[in-house]
Image: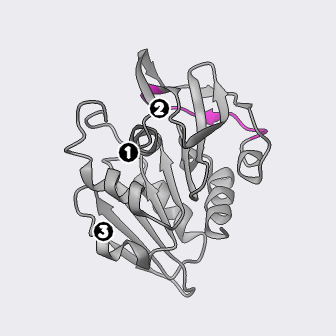
């Protein structure tokens, strides 16, 4: 699916079978981008990645990342190779964490509530979420991070916002696309990197 706009920016959304892909598309539209491209995971052409200004890895309710590296091999490779900003949402965040040697653990039960965040570091990125409750919808949580990632926020469930220490790669364990104001600010911030 391709939706055209009038500015030069391009966003790629990789859909991991998200229930919220329409909200993600709407948030990208709000940025006035030249194009928003939606691909299912496994449809990724790594040679074309450099054409995009922002890559969003959506959440999903299919297979977890643990023990499914083969299914997510294209996204794992994309995360390793990309030089453009990447945002991982929920499962996308878990993919980033897993790619960079973090520890994921299964929650006792699926988290589907709104939670407060505890900011661990004040940055322009975390300020977007400083005064809102975030929408959760996941079964896994990030317990520990690999050495190339840092935690920017946590909740009662674990690490909620991560950032690569060198690359423009961010992950959020919640669903900013369900809060249009925060979601728009988030995408605007990442497009400005």
Give the structural element (helix, strand or loop) at label 2.
loop
Percent x, y for residue 16?
32, 49
Mark 3 to mark 1: distance in Å?
Answer: 25 Å
Q: Is residue 173 above or below residue 89?
A: above
State the count of labels: 3
Mark 2 to mark 3: distance in Å?
Answer: 29 Å
Q: How is the image coloured?
A: one colour
Residue that mark 3 sits on: 46
User: Of discs 3 and 1, which sits in the foreground?
Assistant: 3
Q: In the rendered structure, are the residues bearing label 2 and label 3 in contact, judged by CB atoms less than 8 Å apart?
A: no
Tell me which residue sits at (30%, 63%) in the image.
39
Tell me which residue sits at (43%, 48%) in the image.
20
Residue that mark 2 sits on: 137
Give the structural element (helix, strand or loop) at label 1.
loop
Please state, as top left, top right, bottom left or bottom right, where the C terminus lies in the image: bottom right
Give the structural element (helix, strand or loop) at label 3.
helix
Tell me where the magenta segment starts and ends, as one range: 130-141
Q: Earlier in the sequence, mark 2 or mark 1?
A: 1
Percent x, y for residue 47?
30, 74
Residue that mark 1 sits on: 19
């Amino acid at each position: 699916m391709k939706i055209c706009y009038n500015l030069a920016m391009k966003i790629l959304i990789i859909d991991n079978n998200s229930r919220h892909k329409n909200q993600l598309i709407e948030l990208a539209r709000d940025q006035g981008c030249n194009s928003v491209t939606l691909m299912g995971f496994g449809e990724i052409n790594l040679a074309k990645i450099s054409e995009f200004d922002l890559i969003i890895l959506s959440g999903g309710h299919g297979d977890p990342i643990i023990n499914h590296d083969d299914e997510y091999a294209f996204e794992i490779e994309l995360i390793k190779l990309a030089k453009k900003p990447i945002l991982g949402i929920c499962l996308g965040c878990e993919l980033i964490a897993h790619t960079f040697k973090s520890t994921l653990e299964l929650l006792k039960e699926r988290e589907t509530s709104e939670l407060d965040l505890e900011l661990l570091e004040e940055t322009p990125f975390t300020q977007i979420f400083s005064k809102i409750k975030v929408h959760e919808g996941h079964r896994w949580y990030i317990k520990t991070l690999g050495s190339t990632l840092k935690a920017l926020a946590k909740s009662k469930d674990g690490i909620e916002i991560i950032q690569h220490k060198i690359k423009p790669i961010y992950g959020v364990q919640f669903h900013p696309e369900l809060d249009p104001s925060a979601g728009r600010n988030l995408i605007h911030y990442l497009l400005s990197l």
